[in-house]
Each structure stands twice: as C-alpha cells, then as structure tokens.
Amino acid sequence: MAGMTLEEYVDAYYGGTLGLSKRYGIQKADDPLTTADTAYFNTMYGAKVFNSLNNESDVFKLLPKQPWNSSGWRVLSKRTASASNAGVTEGGAFPDTDVPDLVELSASLKEVVSAWDLSTAASTLSRADDGLGDVEGFLRDNAATDHAYFIDQMLMKQADTLAGNNFESLDRIIGDTVEDGLDGTGSNIADGDLDIYGQDRSTTGSGDEWRDANVSTGTVSGQLATARVLSLDLLDSIIGDALENGAVYENLIFLTGYDTLEEWKQLIMSGTSNASWRFMMEAQSPKNQSGVKSEPGMNLDSRVGYYDSIPIFATQHAPKAALTNGTTGVGTGISNIYLMDLAGLHFKLAVPTTYVANEDLGVTQKLAREYAFITGGEVICTNFPTQGKVRDLEL
C-alpha cells in the first residue's frame, strides 16, 4: 500500500486486490424491520415518505482524502539550533552541529458502521398494496444519508467529548493549551480532553508550541472564559497567526454554524470597521473544495461565502462554547468559527464507504437479510499552528 495515490488505493480496494473489502460481514442486528412495524405497512398513508430532517452533510466532503498507507507520521517540532548562530568570525570554527527535532505521531484506524436488516416477510409485503414499495431501496438510501450525517456529527463534536471509537473531532484537533482546564460552571473542557495522537497538551513549554492551534478565547478567569461578541478583529487575528506560521491563502477555509454566519453577514454588510471590501468580490470565481462548491462574490447563501478571499462553509453541526458572564449569564452562545489549513489537515482513508449485503439465508440462518455501510479511517493533522478557532461568542 505504501506509495499508492488515493485513486490507486480506492481502485485496489473496490477491485478486491487489497483483500480488505472481503473482510467485512454482517453478524448482528438489534432492530430488524418486520411486518410488525406499522409505520411501514399501512394502506392509509401511501408509499411516499416526506423528509422533515436536515440531513445536510458537507464537513466530511471538505477534508482532503489520502490513502491509509501508514498509521504514523513525523512532525518537525524544532528548527536546527546551529542555524541561529551560523555567523562566525573570519577563519573561525564551525558552530556546534545540530539536527532538527522530530516527533512521531500515530493514529488508530476507526471504523464507522451503519447496519440494518429486513425480514423476508417485510420485503415481500412491501411491494403489495400495504407497503412502501421498494423498501430495500428506501432503507439503503436512508442509511446512506444517515451514515454521512453522523460522520459529520462526529467530526464536529465538542472538545469535551472524547472520540473513542468515533472519528476525531475538529474541535479537539484545533485546540490550544489555553482551553485545557476550562472546566468550571458553564464550561466542560477538562484536563486531558485536548490530548490527541498520544500528546499531552495540558502544558506547553519551549519546543511544544508545534502541537497547539491558534485559538481565540474570551478572557480566561479561573476555569471560565468570558463571552464576547463577534468582531472582524478576531477573524483577522487568527488569519494573521495562520499566515505567520506558514499557511497560504489558497489552502484556507472557514467553517462555522448558520447562527454565526448570520451575525457575520450582518457585521460585514453594516460596514463595521470599513471592512465591506473584504466581502465585495463579485469578480472572484467560485472555489470547488472536495466537491463542495462555494459561491462567488457577495452571494453568501446557506452553504458558503467569502471573507478576505477565504471561502466560508457552514454546517448544522458546529459546536457552541458554553459561556459565562455573558449578557444572559451562563449559557450557550453561537457557533465557533474554525479556520482550517487544508494543506495540514486531511482524512486518511482506509476503508472507502462500502455497502455490504448478506442476503444468503443459509448464512444468516434466519428469515432476514442484513446490510451495512462501512467507512474506515481517521482525521489527521500534520500542522497544528496553521489551524485556528474563534470560540466563546454570543449575540
């Protein structure tokens, strides 16, 4: 697998030459669909099902994908010391030799499974006049949507929710020592919640700065961070920090929630700080990021817009920091804003989303067929200082 491109890896996976796709089977079902499920079998309601849920899923699409050709990677954590005193006197001796410091990081393969099963009786009757029609197709399409929805939900979990067997969350990855220990009333981040890839981020000394992102919090007092309103200065600050640490504009995107997006639009359109120029880019073409397309110029719709030439994407799953000393006291504010450098952040893909079906009744040993969607991999960050976050925001 080493040296494979993502395209070669996916072709090998689905083509069977990796042998991975043959390793998955369905052995367990907890809630099978049978004819006892009257919501599925009722002549009064017809076959159509109307979706009343927001199943939008864009976060997973945004992350660049790389093949899982190794479980670890190295990070350059400190420059060569001898470079700082390379100037010598005429005829002088070479300075002491040194090599850059490397840190080895590793991640475990995570597998997310969406499974369901269907009794033979339910399958047969679904095509009669009392069912949904193609119930197999309905369940498969619904499971595919839910699979993507819950992966997005995992990727946007609050930092105090440890990943466990789920994919890592961006809120934990884009974290800073300043957040560690904000576990007073109204805040839930405890010591150790931000530790990731085997690293202890509870303290940062000289040489440890490489593992911290640029996080803008409210004023920290004791174990709490004070609420503040969104300002363009906060955004400009994390952009500047990312650029100073080596990010380039073309690799940056913003990600936030719809509530913060509304405040952001109002702030810019009101001309605050004479910053409307940052938003008025009618001539700028749309950007296409991993299949999620942004709108050009001032067309800031529910998906995306621009700030300072950086595209903005929105998700319903964006976490909101718990607040203290806000206008309404301790409570929940508006969504965090994430500045993501996609050159240093990707999803390492081991198991491209796979549909598996066990329809052989001799194998299942019951009058039911079993199905699942499986996705395997993990979110990987190779450059923390170029990532950013603005939290502790309120209306």
Image (cartoon, grey):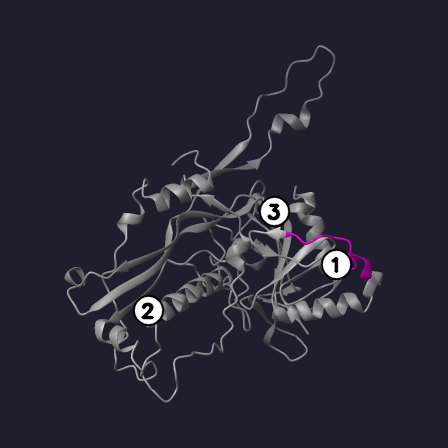
Q: Is residue 40 left or right of residue 275?
A: left
Can I make out residue 201 in this image? Answer: yes
Tag 2: amino acid: Glu
Q: List the residue tagged with mark 2.
A: 136
Q: Which of the two discs, 2 and 3, labels the residue nearer the N terminus?
A: 2
SS for dot 1: loop
- Say if 247 sits above or below 175 in the image: above
Q: Nearer the viewer, mark 3 or mark 1?
A: 1
Which residue is located at x 75 percent, y 62 percent? 298
Q: Residues within 10 Å of mark 2 (few under 14, many from 20)?
A: some
> Disc 2 and disc 1: Cα gap in Å?
43 Å
Question: Mostly what secondary structure, the magenta segment?
Answer: loop
Q: List the residue tagged with mark 1.
A: 297
Q: Nearer the viewer, mark 2 or mark 1?
A: 2
Tag 3: amino acid: Pro
Residue 48 position, x and y percent, is 42, 79
Residue 268 position, x and y percent, is 77, 65
Q: Which of the two discs, 3 and 1, labels the residue nearer the N terminus?
A: 1
Q: Which of the two discs, 2 and 1, labels the residue nearer the N terminus?
A: 2
Q: Is residue 362 left or right of residue 218?
A: left
- Say if 321 sits above or below 110 in the image: below
Tag 1: amino acid: Gly
Residue extent of the magenta highlight:
276-287
Which residue is located at x 55 percent, y 73 percent? 186
> Disc 2 and disc 3: Cα gap in Å?
47 Å
Query: Which residue of the protein is positioned furthest toward the bottom in this rendering?
Result: 44
Does residue 194 show up magenta in the picture?
no
Can you tell which mark lies on residue 156? none
Does residue 283 show up magenta in the picture?
yes
